[in-house]
Image (tube, rainbow, N blue to C red):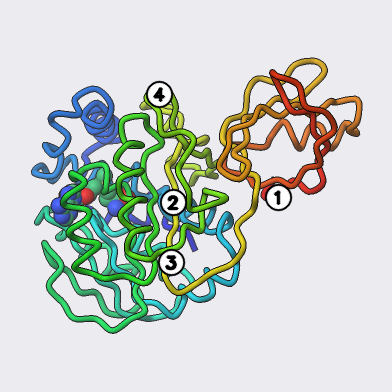
């Protein structure tokens, strides 16, 4: 079951005296994430802001992880169930909670540099966690394989060399990144992707092939969108803090050195505004970018509505009808993950 705000409030390391105080703290944290990136770590030293982060941002991690895993090969997700989770940059540990939400008790390792975040994570885990929790400011354990290393909104807060050192030290079988869908983060993601491929990992998501990324250029970046159903109380905070937390842009990438399956050959990387006549997408097909056009006259109303809701990240299977210099007109064979 997902954590709710009411359930979490008594377990925060700071007690908000009113909803207005909580909303104002959320606005402060949000300001640091978006407008004051140079002061991004300030919130980690203030119990009030750590608690606000937990109440607002971290609560969405549980439904978010569920949605992210729906994009992954089912057999891989099954394989992950027998892996030990290493939650890197764990913060209040909501990805660890999400991981054990199925109720399987197991040991989870959290690496978190901020003592306040570790304190917050321990409080939440004592109330809601299942299984044993091991916490530390750095990787210092010897854990048998298989291991899943999860970067949950944390690789963007460290430099590439630090993330690479963690990957090398943990020596994971599987790696999952769930990071902000920002242009600033993407070049880092590409360096980490290159490092993992060099180590012998296969990329499972989002690329069709392990070859060069066609978005490796300054004006574009590969990211996905996820629609998260919020807890109604968080939804209320969202409105009060004037933040849209329903359609979330993310950078998701998944790697494994033990699991292999054939990746989908076509993945939507951008949804352009549809016209009266057609749906218009940018698709990564065998690691080449193509502009797809799907004529509405070839679709029923219901099919067209479903396509209108499709977001970047979805895999599709199409048949090419016509190629021009500007676009490839296609017929949809199966729209996955609608
Ligand atoms: C935005 S929070 C994300 C927390 C949590 N994973 C989540 O998604 O809600 C980023 C966390 O990464 C941690 N972090 C950043 N660099 C780190 C490093 N080099 N070692 C350990 N933790 C780090 C920060 O202290 C912070 O708690």
Q: Is residue 93 visible?
A: yes
Secondary structure beneath dot 4 equals: loop
Quarter residue 274 falls in: top right
Q: Nearer the viewer, mark 4 or mark 3?
A: 3
The residue singled out by tag 4 in the image is: 242
Q: Considering the image in quadrants, where does the C terminus appear?
A: top right
- Residue 142 x/y as whole percent: 18, 81
Kindly identify the residue that appears in the image at 83 percent across and 28 percent down. 322
Q: Which mark is drawn over residue 256?
A: 3
Kindly identify the residue that appears in the image at 55 percent across and 42 percent down. 287
Q: Is residue 24 above or below residue 77?
A: above
Q: Is residue 9 visible?
A: no
Disc 2 + disc 1, Cβ < 8 Å? no
The residue singled out by tag 1 in the image is: 336
Disc 2 + disc 4, Cβ < 8 Å? no
Label 2, label 1: how far apart the Cα atoms are: 18 Å
Left or right: 22, with 215 as reference point: left
Q: Is residue 104 above or below residue 292?
A: below
Label 4, label 3: how far apart the Cα atoms are: 38 Å
- Residue 50 x/y as whole percent: 19, 45
Disc 1 + disc 4, Cβ < 8 Å? no
Mark 1, residues whose alpha carbon is within 10 Å: few (<14), some, or many (≥20)?
A: some
Mark 2 vs 4, N-terminal side: 4
Secondary structure beneath dot 1 equals: loop
Task: In this rendered view, identify the residue nearer to me: 323 or 40.
Answer: 323
Q: Nearer the viewer, mark 2 or mark 4?
A: 2
Disc 4 + disc 3, Cβ < 8 Å? no
Q: Is residue 91 above or below residue 310?
A: below
Mark 2, residues whose alpha carbon is within 10 Å: few (<14), some, or many (≥20)?
A: many
Label 3, label 1: how far apart the Cα atoms are: 22 Å
């Amino acid at each position: 079951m997902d954590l709710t705000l009411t359930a979490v409030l008594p377990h925060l390391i700071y007690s908000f005296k009113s909803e207005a105080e909580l909303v104002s703290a959320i606005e402060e944290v949000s300001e640091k994430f978006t407008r004051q990136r140079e002061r991004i770590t300030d919130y980690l030293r203030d119990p009030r802001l750590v608690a606000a982060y937990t109440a607002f941002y971290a609560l969405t991690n549980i439904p978010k992880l569920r949605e992210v895993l729906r994009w992954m090969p089912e057999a891989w997700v099954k394989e992950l169930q027998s892996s030990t989770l290493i939650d890197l940059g764990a913060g209040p540990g909501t990805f660890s909670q999400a991981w054990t939400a199925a109720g399987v008790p197991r040991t989870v390792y959290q690496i978190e540099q901020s003592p306040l975040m570790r304190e917050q994570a321990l409080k939440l885990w004592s109330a809601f966690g299942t299984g044993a929790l091991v916490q530390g400011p750095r990787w210092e354990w010897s854990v048998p394989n298989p291991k899943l290393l999860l970067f949950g909104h944390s690789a963007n807060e460290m430099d590439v060399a630090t993330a690479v050192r963690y990957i090398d030290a943990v020596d994971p079988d599987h790696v999952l990144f769930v990071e902000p869908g920002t242009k600033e983060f993407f070049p880092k993601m590409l360096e980490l992707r290159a490092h993992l491929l060099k180590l012998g990992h296969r990329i499972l998501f989002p690329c069709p092939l392990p070859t060069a990324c066609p978005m490796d250029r300054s004006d574009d970046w590969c990211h996905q969108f996820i629609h998260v159903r919020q807890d109604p109380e968080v939804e209320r905070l969202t409105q009060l803090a004037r933040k849209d937390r329903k359609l979330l842009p993310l950078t998701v990438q998944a790697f494994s050195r033990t699991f292999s399956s054939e990746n989908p050959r076509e993945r939507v990387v951008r949804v352009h505004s549809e016209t009266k006549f057609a749906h218009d997408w940018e698709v990564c097909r065998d690691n080449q970018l193509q502009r797809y056009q799907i004529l509405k006259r070839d679709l029923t109303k219901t099919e067209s509505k479903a396509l209108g809701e499709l977001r970047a990240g979805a895999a599709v299977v199409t048949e090419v009808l016509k190629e021009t210099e500007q676009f490839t007109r296609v017929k949809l064979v199966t729209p996955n993950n609608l």
